[in-house]
Image (cartoon, rainbow, N blue to C red):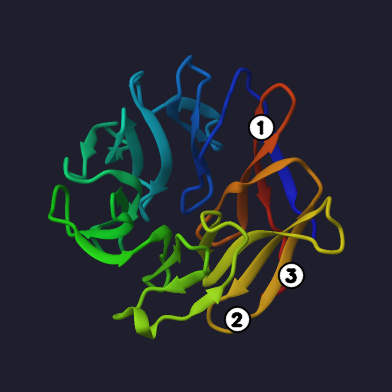
Amino acid sequence: MRPRSASSRRRPAATATRRCPPDGSRVVFVSDRGGSLQLWLHDASSRQTYALTHDDGARFFYPQWRSDGRRLLVTRRHATRGELVEIDLDSQLQQVISDTTVDVRFGTYAPGHGFLLIHRDSRGSRLLELAGPRATPRTLREQVAAVEVDAAGGHIYYSRADGSGVRELRATADEEQVIAAVGNRFAWHVRDGALWYFDADEADHEQILLRRRGLADARDEVLWRTRDAIDHRSFDLSADARRLVLIRITRNDTDIGLLRFLRTSR
């Protein structure tokens, strides 16, 4: 299966994290093309690209779309503390979701309502749940590296900081089992009923593989192979998993690529 690709080069740009919305028509990413690292949005349908933030004293990480595509979350760090910020795309108004007691390393929307975030302190990294903006956080799990929400099924998946694999969050930790062991505990996504991650090709060390593991049937597939120089730690997929967004590393700048998978069967 060969993906069709469309990419755009812009200089200068030092793109860090990027995120594909539910319909795959827009991409948000962090870039210094305006002189400082800010959050940007590219709309493929209108071919417009513009900055969503204008805060020279902050660093932005891990933008996350709301399911309706009208708002997004981003982790904003000032000095040594991070906070979770929600941006309304129509008005571009910002609202701080976390309170000052939390050092946010990552945040996303919880199933239904509320927010999930990873907080780090002297005890390590913890997965917290917030019922609403500035709400008192509730600890769900300790020593968590990354968290993802399956929008279709409403399930929560997380990877542990010890690299022991991806698990589905259950009522108690004793009920949980490792779904898959991934090479990088931060570099994986759950989309369209499957776990997606890049892996090394043991038969060809110059090639990397994009793998799909079904959550219901545990079926493993290789969906794409490449020898291109890409940042396999930083990628995303649309909600239907038909579009893959990744960063291709070049000598002079960084290229954001948009790939469409052509599937003949499920």
Query: Which quadrant of the view contains residue 181?
Result: bottom right
Query: Residue 14 appears at what percent x and percent y?
Result: 57, 26
Closest to the observer: 96 or 44? 96
- Of the residues shown, which amino acid type is indicated by label 1? Asp
Q: State whether residue 79 is above or below residue 72.
A: above
Identify which residue is drawn at 56% across, 54% down. Answer: 187
Question: Is 66 on the left-hand or right-hand side of 241?
Answer: left
- Of the residues shown, which amino acid type is indicated by label 2? Ala
Question: Is 229 on the left-hand or right-hand side of 161?
Answer: right
Q: SS for tag 3? A: loop
Q: Which residue was labeled with disc 2?
A: 218
Residue farthest to the top?
A: 35
Identify which residue is drawn at 17% across, 54% down. Answer: 132
Disc 2 crowd, CA 10 A, few/some/many (<14, 14-19, 20+): few
> Quadrant location of the C terminus?
bottom right
> Quadrant location of the N terminus?
bottom right
Report, in whole angstroms, how far the alpha carbon at label 2 lies from the one at label 1: 33 Å
Q: Which residue was labeled with disc 1?
A: 255
